[in-house]
Image: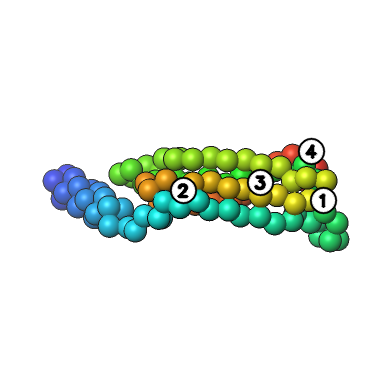
Amino acid sequence: MAINRAWSFAFVYGVVLNFAACRDKIPDTQTTIQGVVIDQDGRVIKNAGINMYGSEQRGLKQVTVFNVTVFTDANGSYKVSQLLPKTADAVDIRPVSSDSV
């Protein structure tokens, strides 16, 4: 029974690595994202943090390959610009906790 469990783990691990290796990468290109952050009442939020980061799958681990944070101006506007590395296979944009949010 122990041999079957060990073999099953090795098989699943191999399948996961194969799927990770076959995934398409994001093309390396300058990417810009911009917008305005507003609250639920439609008022702009100044000094709200916006974080854009990318990661790459290395085996079973997701590793960050870039991480950029910007803050909104007095009009709630933001602009994030980043050259996406060839190795990135995931990009995410999230709000950053700040005093204003």
Q: Which residue is mark 4?
A: 99
Q: Quadrant of residue 34?
A: bottom right
**Label 1 secondary element:** loop
Judge by depth and name the residue closer to the eye, 67 or 40.
67
| Label located before the other in sequence (2 or 4) | 2
- The amino acid pointed to by label 2 is Leu
Residue at 78% over, 51% down: 76
> x, y (%) of residue 87?
37, 46
Sequence-wise, which precedes: disc 4 or disc 3? 3
Visible in this render: residue 8?
no
Q: Answer with left or right where residue 79 lies relative to residue 36.
A: left
Q: List the residue tagged with mark 3.
A: 50
Identify the residue at image location x=33%, y=43%.
58
| C-alpha gap between disc 2 and disc 4 | 29 Å
Numbered badge on residue 75: 1
Residue at 32% in and 58% down: 23
* Residue at 53% over, 40% down: 67
Tell me the SS state at disc 2.
loop
Mark linked to residue 84: 2
